[in-house]
């Protein structure tokens, strides 16, 4: 029976993912809470029917190889210490089935600096978590810049701290047709 799902966790912040992951060609779900080796995503099985991928500490990773998994519908990027680079954002546009995107920022990090000309119409759920304190004006500006990039959002969850340390959880519904 081929392995279809695996979660690899190593709490040592310098631990690297184990070698041999590229042999798991039937993998559909991978949760990787360890650093990728210098070859980045090249160490993962390019021909696997991957639907869900979680990467921890993906700041310096070239995300272009994500296009190897056209069935990828769920992507979680955990422990981001910097905002995604433009090329990382554009790599997401090559994932036609990507419907769920989660960005989990490390403390005081803003990860939602999205290029204004980028369009990700396939994404219908966006989650962003940060412990950074945001003002109402900053949240309003984030929303203003996000909606054109993600025109088909149905669920947007911005978890963070505002003045009252209350999570922001906004669910969008399509407008009723008249």
Image: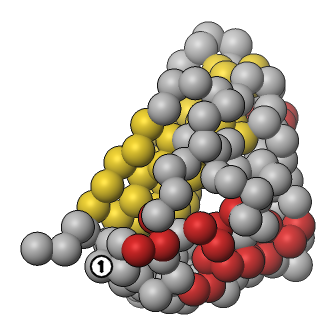
Would you say 29 lies left or right of 156 here?
Answer: left
Q: Residue furthest left?
A: 1
Residue occupying image coordinates x 54% and y 19%:
166
Residue occupying image coordinates x 53% and y 69%:
44
Q: Nearer the viewer, residue 129 or 68?
A: 68
The C terminus lies in quadrant: bottom left
Would you say 95 lies left or right of 61 here?
Answer: left
Please count the marks in the image.
1
124 in relation to 102, above or below: below
Q: Residue furthest front?
A: 19
167 in relation to 111, above or below: above
The type of colouring in the image is: secondary structure
Location of residue 147 by image quarter: bottom right
Q: Nearer the viewer, residue 56 or 113?
A: 56
Q: Position of residue 35 (x, y in %)?
A: 63, 44
Q: Callout 1: 10 Å neighbours few (<14), some, many (20+)?
A: some
Q: Position of residue 11 (x, y in %)?
A: 51, 25
Residue occupying image coordinates x 73% and y 77%:
64
Residue occupying image coordinates x 52% and y 57%:
19
Q: Is residue 78 visible?
A: no
The N terminus lies in quadrant: bottom left
Would you say 176 lies left or right of 164 here?
Answer: left
Q: Which residue is mark 1?
A: 26
Q: Position of residue 42 (x, y in %)?
A: 64, 73
21 in relation to 71, above or below: above
Q: Is residue 108 visible?
A: yes
Q: Secondary structure at mark 1?
A: loop
Location of residue 106 by image quarter: top right
Q: Position of residue 21 (x, y in %)?
A: 46, 64
């Amino acid at each position: 029976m081929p392995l279809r799902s695996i979660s690899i966790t190593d709490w040592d912040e310098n631990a690297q993912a184990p070698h041999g992951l590229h042999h798991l060609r039937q993998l559909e779900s991978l949760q990787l809470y360890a650093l990728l080796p210098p070859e980045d995503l090249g160490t993962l099985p390019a021909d696997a029917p991957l639907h869900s991928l979680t990467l921890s500490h993906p700041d310096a990773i070239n995300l272009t190889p994500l296009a190897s998994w056209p069935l990828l519908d769920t992507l979680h990027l955990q422990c981001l210490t910097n905002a995604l680079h433009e090329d990382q954002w554009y790599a997401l546009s090559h994932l036609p089935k990507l419907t769920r995107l989660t960005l989990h920022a490390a403390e005081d990090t803003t990860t939602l600096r999205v290029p204004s000309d980028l369009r990700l119409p396939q994404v219908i759920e966006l989650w962003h978590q940060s412990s950074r304190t945001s003002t109402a004006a900053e949240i309003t500006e984030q929303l203003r810049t996000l909606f054109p990039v993600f025109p088909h959002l149905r669920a947007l969850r911005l978890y963070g701290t505002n003045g009252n340390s209350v999570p922001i959880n906004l669910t969008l519904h399509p407008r009723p047709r008249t």
